[in-house]
Amino acid sequence: MKNSIICQGFLIVLCLVISILGQGQISVFHVDQSSVPDSKQGVFYALPRTVVNIEVVINRIEYYKGPYAEYALRYLGLKNVVMANAVEYRINGINITTSAEPDPGQYYFVKLGEKLSKTEKAGLLSLNESGLILGTLPNAVEPAEQVIRVFKDEDGNILTEKDVFPEIFKYYADVSVFEKVDTIIRKVSIDTLTLERQILKRTMVDKSPEQKAREAADFIAKIKDNRFNLLTGYQEVSYNQETLEYMDTQLKLLEKEYMKLFTGISIQKSYTYDYKYIPFANQINTEIPIFKFLSDRGVMDLDEMGGGAITINIQRVGNTNQVTNYLSRAIEEDENHGFYYRIPELARVNVTQPDGTQEETQCVINQLGVVTYLPASKWKVNFHETSGSIKGLVID
């Protein structure tokens, strides 16, 4: 009699457990073109895929020839000076990061069990506005968004292209004419007497470029002498330290400005280009061109002629190989599936420049890993935000 009561009690508890599991029963279906929907009552969610973001910093260097560049060697002994106006582009740096976005090939439909209560339905899923399950989608990146740092003078004023030349060669606009005095001798004959009359003729004559260069070189030598006299105490004046440093600094700045007339000047501007690349399994270990680069043109589109290609290459590390082999040997026991989740793959990402310079990093690439699923009855699960992998699991 006692054993019969125990058996009846066990059957009641078993039925209660089955009933509770039935309430938590859900089915998750992969959504593709061949899917045949049998219900509209459910929730859609997506697993994230990884986007590789490549940030490229390009330096544009503008070279301006000094007005006295031809005389730099003769008067100052300078050889390495700018002899022609030119523009040059250089790749200053490449930064590789990743972000997440919904994977179009990994959308799923969650068919809710009819016995789920309203409370259970409300707390079943947490999605963002893009449909990522417990995910966060970073701001989309334009294929080529350009950020320009403009050139400013010492006072913080923005200079346009037309303002650059007079700004960098500010002392070229010195007096460019000089007074020429000619002596004219006139002979006047009066009877047998001959007289000479001297007349001074004053005219203004333009200075030649060589004359201007020689005067500028002489002024540079004078500045150096003045700095030497100042630092050696030639004036025999007891200046305090702040005054001495100020005068020396001003003389150095003045010398630098006059040296520009011979050496020329270069102005550097920085441009930032952002590219995004979505890795696919059929492109692994393949050099994929991102954009082209030419030193005298900068960044170019891939369909433009000339230039060298900057390429990206992604190699799998292979950390999910054993999982793939295990799942391929597993036997399907139930047609009903619970939540699908990812096991991401580690990968090495290389960005190669035309000269062979490489920028390498290692990161997680979601879509190169494995997608598998939970049993239909075990549905209380938390996911990592950007990978779609399991963060926590509660078995009902």
Image (cartoon, rainbow, N blue to C red):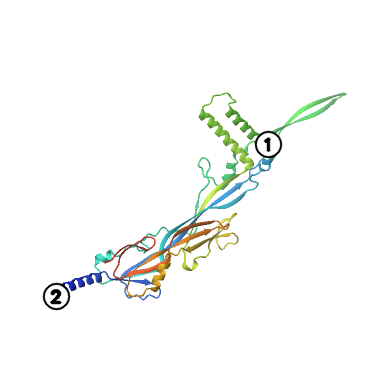
Of residue 240 and residue 17, the one placed in the foreground of this image is 17
Question: Residue 322: which quarter of the image?
Answer: bottom left
Q: Residues within 10 Å of mark 2 (few under 14, many from 20)?
A: few
Mark 1 vs 2, N-terminal side:
2
Residue 291: image tag:
none
Q: Residue at x 55, y 31 (%)?
A: 247
Residue mark closest to the camera, 1 vs 2: 2
Residue 12: x and y in percent read: 18, 72
Of residue 322 and residue 165, the one placed in the foreground of this image is 322
Cβ atoms under marks 1 and 2 closer than 8 Å: no
Give the residue type at disc 1. Arg
Give the residue type at disc 2. Ser
Question: Horizontal placement of 382 versus 86: left or right?
Answer: left
Residue 253: x and y in percent read: 57, 36
Q: Is residue 183 visible?
A: yes
Q: Residues within 10 Å of mark 1 (few under 14, many from 20)?
A: some
Question: Residue 31: which quarter of the image?
Answer: bottom left
| Position of the N terminus by quadrant | bottom left
| Position of the C terminus by quadrant | bottom left
Work out how far the residue at label 1 is from the one at label 2, CA to CA, in angstroms: 121 Å
Q: Disc 2 marks which residue?
A: 4
Q: Is residue 105 visible?
A: no
Q: Residue at x 37, y 69 (%)?
A: 372
Of residue 54 and residue 334, the one placed in the foreground of this image is 334
Q: Secondary structure at mark 1?
A: helix
Q: Secondary structure at mark 2?
A: helix
The residue most toward the right is 192
Q: Disc 1 marks which residue?
A: 214
Q: Residue at x 78, y 30 (%)?
A: 184
Residue 128: x and y in percent read: 35, 61
Give the vertical position of 174 relative to 146 (above or below).
Answer: above
